[in-house]
Image: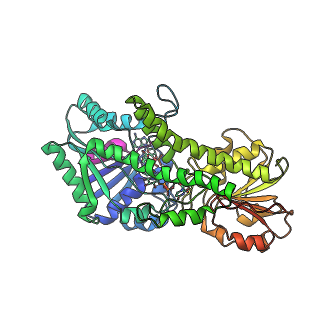
Amino acid sequence: MKICCLGAGYVGGPTMAMIAAKCPQIEVLVVDPNAKRIAAWNSEELPVYEPGLFEVVKTARGRNLFFSTDVEAAIKAADMIFVCVGTPTKTYGVGAGQAADLKYVELTARTIARVAEGHKIIVEKSTVPVRTAHAIQTILRANSRNGQFQVLSNPEFLAEGTAIADLQSPDRILIGGEPTPEGQQAAAALVDIYANWVPRDRILTTNLWSSELSKLVANAFLAQRISSINSISALCEATGADVDEVAHAIGRDSRIGPKFLKASVGFGGSCFQKDILNLTYLCKYFNLPEVAAYWESVVRMNDWQKSRFAKYIVNQLFNTVTGKQIAVLGFAFKKDTNDTRETAAISVCRDLLEEGATVVVYDPRVPAEQIRQDVLGDKTNPNLKIVNSALAACDNTHAIAVLTEWDEFKNIDFAAALEGMHKPAFIFDGRNVLPHKKLSDLGYRVYAVGKPVPPAA
Ligand code: NAD
Ligand code: UGA
């Protein structure tokens, strides 16, 4: 069997590498028009940083895992075609700012229709609005001369930073197909691939629309928990309660559970915001404004949390940061990834620069050019500096803001690191990962999300 995947990004690369590693009998070809990305997948320096990924790629690359820019040849040769292209929020036209932009998905459907011949199974892995499979089917059927297609929905639930563990041992695999015999046969073929390493009772099959909708709903529920605990973090700061203690106490209730209750500077990543906005748009489209408003508030709470954190820094630094230096430790949207899409660090850095601060950023995995592009776009600002170690960022700074929970920040010797710093030294822990008590004992004023505010100096 030959499969191909259109899109060699954060999902296409790792998921296909795992399939190839687990199924040596299947030839897996990952294609992408982005030649730089493909060259990186074929090199020792993969385009995606993900713990354990390189080992999985090395197991199969050159054996039954290949990366290429030849999209059409891959489509022609494959029995099963995964569509793993981006579905960002639309920035133009109808639904701008909310609806998913399906132009890449549509283009893949048109390319498949044009070049594919014979029976092909099309697997929609990108996150899409409900009923996108119907649009894909329509495009394929209207534009193909010699192809017969079955479209399946198989959303991906991996989280960045833990992608390999998530792919190796997923909570569930979800496959949606048409209720026809051909549709069920196609779904069974995909079930058989995953069953090479995933227990069958973890492979769920549903109808197409349930599968598509479940993906949006899973992300909405996860993000909702973060916005819920972040809303409570503000109340904790106002009342003297400690958000970690509250999260622990409520998480012990087995109906609530302990996961995804970590208060933070705000959730980031390419999907939570975009998928909730997509869900919101769908609700509006189906004339359900109350449902739309309910889910939209999850994103609004997150925006508030990000701007609240930057304002908090300014307030604590005597209402002005003009001319002050602030070290930002961590820029990626979470640890163990080099992905910066929608990271809270972007808005925090912008807000601080806007207030006149000099912002010195360090991230162990994100290249300086990426940080500059994310914060400034095509503009320049000499007040944004990027350095290559946490200690260099902390050198002679007025305040430190921790925005990503990289393990290396937990172990910094702050006593040594802060030698020679302007006093008083302020630390703003946007992730609640530093040893707060130890730092306070060293004489630093430590502010952390959802923690009691230290008494005035
Ligand atoms: P990405 O931007 O990293 O990768 C998408 C890739 O598709 C790009 O490299 C692009 O060049 C390529 N592409 C565009 N048009 C193409 C075409 N016609 N043929 C072949 N390749 C083409 O995006 P991603 O993070 O991998 O996300 C892909 C999808 O998976 C999105 O719908 C996203 O919502 C979903 N998803 C992402 C994650 C995640 O952790 N990033 C997790 C689950 C689901
Ligand atoms: C998320 C989901 O967890 C995946 O299941 C899903 O497949 C993926 O989105 C997607 O569709 O793209 P991801 O965004 O990679 O995965 O990472 P998460 O671990 O969910 O973290 C998202 C953001 O929430 C990060 O900024 C993280 O720091 C933040 N977060 C997470 C918190 O602030 N508190 C928490 O308790 C958990």
Res 166 visible: yes
454 up-or-down from 439: above or below = above
- 363, 6: nearer the viewer: 363
Position of the C terminus, as image quadrant, is bottom right
Res 61 visible: no
Q: Residue furthest front?
A: 239
Question: What residue sits 47% from the left and 45% below the top?
Answer: 34
Residue 125, given in percent of the width and then of the height, sits at 35, 47
- 245, 359: nearer the viewer: 245
Quarter location, residue 335: bottom right
Q: Residue furthest left?
A: 181
Q: Residue furthest top?
A: 93
Residue 446, given in percent of the width and then of the height, sits at 74, 64
Question: What residue sits 47% from the left and 40% below the top?
Answer: 294
Q: What colour scheme governs how the chains and residues are painted in the rendered image of this protein?
A: rainbow
- 134, 372: nearer the viewer: 134
Is 419 on the left or on the right of 386, as rendered? right
- 114, 248: nearer the viewer: 248
Is 76 on the left or on the right of 453, as rendered? left
Residue range highlighted in magenta: 70-86
Q: How many marks?
A: 0
Position of the N terminus, as image quadrant, is bottom left
Is 312 on the left or on the right of 173, as rendered? right
10 up-or-down from 277: above or below = below
Is 257 on the left or on the right of 153, as rendered? right
Magenta segment: does it hold 74?
Answer: yes
Residue 157, given in percent of the width and then of the height, sits at 39, 54
Magenta segment: does it hold 109?
Answer: no
Residue 26, given in percent of the width and then of the height, sits at 26, 59
